[in-house]
Amino acid sequence: MREFVHYLLFGWYPYLAVTVMVIGSILRFDTNQYSWRSQSSQFLRRKQMMLGSNLFHMGILVLLGGHFVGLLTPIGVVDYLGISHQSKQILALVAGGIAGIVAFIGASLLLHRRLFDPRIRRSSATLDIVVLVLIWLQIALGLSTTYWTLQHVDGREMVNFMAWANGLLTLQPGSAAYIVNTHIVYKLHIVLGLTLFLLTPFTRLVHVFSAPIWYLLRPGYQIVRTRRGKGAPPRAALPVGTPVYSGGSASARAMTEEVQ
């Protein structure tokens, strides 16, 4: 029975969680786009929210990137690049430890704000609080694995997790055998992470798919307000898409006046 539960959780549950996350998110976006938002309450206790949110997001992005790259990179590629398993393990410990502490502080600030401010708590859905508590526990579990990871600095345990993740990626649920003997803390960390994937389409976590990365590539612009006297006649409306210039060269001003 114990072996059956293990293969169910680490051989088949990952496929269920990812499938529900992907298909559920697509259906939610297609049928209820107005709910596709982070539902921020930043007008209440703004300073604590901004500090906690920035720390949490900076840390969690590093953790997610590290987990995906560290687990899904084929072991052969790592060996081909000449990176020893011990070096990779130490890098994961240092970088993941720092990012984990940053994310944990941020999540703690956000959770304290949501639980102990009566106005924010009244405006929060029960599922929002549950998800935030689960995220806090997930980060805490990840940090707690540091103790057991230090017992395997040679990278042996990490290689088992890489073999498991690569096996699942190539549709081999039997790869759950690689982590049969790992410590229960690692297993809880994995199951809770997969559960967060499963809950994503039903919570505000869907906003992770709408990260405004394209803002980094858009051209810059400046909004200029023209000061006009109280007695000055109103300026005629410009057609949509017409550029408006304030100051600048005489040719630019002339072009604006011709349009008007």
Image (cartoon, rainbow, N blue to C red):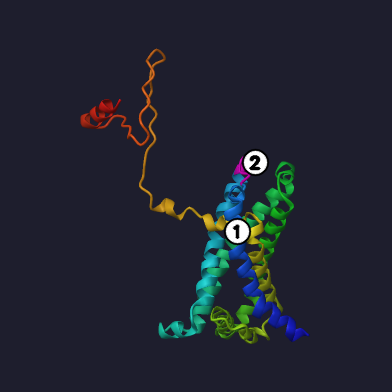
Q: Secondary structure at mark 2?
A: loop
Q: Position of residue 165 (x, y in %)?
A: 57, 79
What amino acid type should be assigned to the residue bearing mark 1? Leu
Work out which residue is located at the far left of the displayed protein and give it. 251
Task: Describe residue 93's horizontal placement relative to residue 118 as left or right.
Answer: left
Whether label 1 touches label 2, CB < 8 Å: no
Residue matched to label 2 = 44
Q: Residue at x 70, y 51 (%)?
A: 112
What amino acid type should be assigned to the residue bearing mark 2? Leu
Is 7 rendered above or below residue 194?
A: below
Q: Position of residue 29 (x, y in %)?
A: 58, 55
Q: Nearer the viewer, residue 57 or 55?
A: 57
For marks 1 and 2, give the CA distance.
Answer: 32 Å
Is 184 rendered above or below residue 110?
A: below
**Which quadrant of the view contains residue 170?**
bottom right
Sequence-earlier tag: 1 or 2: 1
Q: Nearer the viewer, residue 143 or 66?
A: 66
Q: What is the total number of numbered labels drawn onto the structure image?
A: 2
Q: Residue at x 66, y 65 (%)?
A: 198
Q: Residue at x 57, y 86 (%)?
A: 156
Residue matched to label 1 = 27
In the picture, which quadrant includes the C terminus?
top left
Q: Secondary structure at mark 1?
A: helix
Query: In the image, which residues are magenta?
Result: 40-46
Q: Nearer the viewer, residue 28 or 223?
A: 28
Instruction: Specify the label residue 156 is tagged with.
Output: none
**Which quadrant of the view contains residue 166?**
bottom right
Q: Is residue 145 in view from this perspective?
A: no
Task: Describe residue 213's horizontal placement relative to residue 251 as left or right.
Answer: right
Q: Position of residue 65 (x, y in %)?
A: 51, 67
